Amino acid sequence: MIVKSLRLVHYRNYADETFDFSPGINVIRGKNAQGKTNLVESIYLLSRGYTHKAGTLQDLIGFNEAGFFVQGTVCRQETTHRLEFKLSGKKKEVLIDGKKDPGRERTSRALSTILFEPDDLKIVKEGPEKRRRFMNTELSGFKPNYSHVLKGYTKILNQRNALLKEIRYDKALKPTLALWDEQLVKSGASLMRYRVAYLHSLNQKARALHKKLSGDLEALTLFYQNNVLEHIGELERIEAIFTEKLRASYEEDIHRGSTTYGPHVDDIAIHLNGVDAKKYGSQGQQRTAAIALKLSQIEIYKENTGDYPVVLLDDILSELDARRQENILSILGNTQAFITCTDSSFIENFKGLPLRRIDIQGGRRLGAPCDLK
């Protein structure tokens, strides 16, 4: 899976620029606030339909412009596709080979991306919400239906929570909880099944990768923390167990005005050599574990989509020491990668990788791309 070219029109600080890329490592170099992240963001937008930076799509429109246009030429398994994302005011249009793709399923199959940014290094040490976001983001990348299920669950959960607050003042509404429970259980059970299967694969891939990154000194183990299932053997009865727990917690939920049980409070426990990495791991150990979690997605995506994803490293290498930089670069051999940085010397000195350097200044490409051997 390769992004061959990209055109940005009125996108962020790009007026109208066209780029041609290497099938290997593309180093996007420039000073801060010149548009490096914007370029990587646009590739992510083409694959996901949303970005990791903007609050709304309107935030992506260039200053004093009415809309933006992003076009990418993608080659996957010897088939070339043209992906387009257009926004005019609030009207969005997503096209693949000139045809509308309202569900994003066809575009996500044509282009899969994994984004690694500095904030991802906090996956281990921050709270459960960070790790849930990690699961949701990565699952949505290779399971397009997961995003649909997640949105449905979130909507039902919010409606149930609103009802719980109303019941405080009108007890006659309590019987209607059962109607929302039925919908919450259906979508929540689906989410948990997705997550159990995903974490089973993630545990294997991340453990193997972390073993390599740590020089075989540490064993990484992941545990799915869920307040509905006490053990994995209960997965077959998940709907019945979830329903029972919701009903048993009616009074507590009404008092709190929120739902106690469900995948919205899921977490991943991350252990190194049998010890909780969040509590007892050093910063270096936590960062190495985060790298293993994130980059193990490469093989997971390959298994699920049949092709390697495009890897986007947005200013991540500058956050790491030389050993971890080299570890990451050594993993990218089978993928096309985009690496943003202000100083590319450490990448250019890494032997064995075909590199193309693209210099960016003020939303413009400076000169011709520089291919390095």
Image: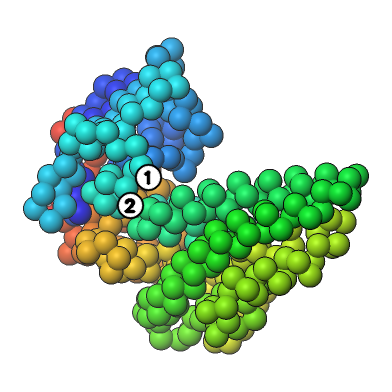
The kind of residue on which mark 2 rests is: Thr
Where disc 1 sits, the SS reads helix
Q: Which residue is mark 1?
A: 48
Foreground: 163 or 94? Answer: 163
Furthest residue in direction left, as rendered: 78
Foreground: 248 or 213? Answer: 248
Task: Establish if 132 lies above or below 19.
Answer: below
Identify the residue at horizontal 38%, vertical 35% (top origin): 38
Residue 285 visible: yes
Q: Quadrant of the C terminus?
A: bottom left
Image depth: mark 2 or mark 1 in front: 1
> In x, y percent, where is residue 162?
75, 45
Where disc 2 sits, the SS reads strand
Crowding near pointer 2: few (<14 within 10 Å), some, many (20+)? many
> In x, y percent, where is residue 155?
60, 46
Foreground: 225 or 215? Answer: 225
Crowding near pointer 1: few (<14 within 10 Å), some, many (20+)? many
Q: Do the residues bearing badges 2 and 1 touch, measured as CB atoms within 8 Å? A: yes
> Residue 321: which disc?
none
Q: Which residue is mark 2?
A: 113
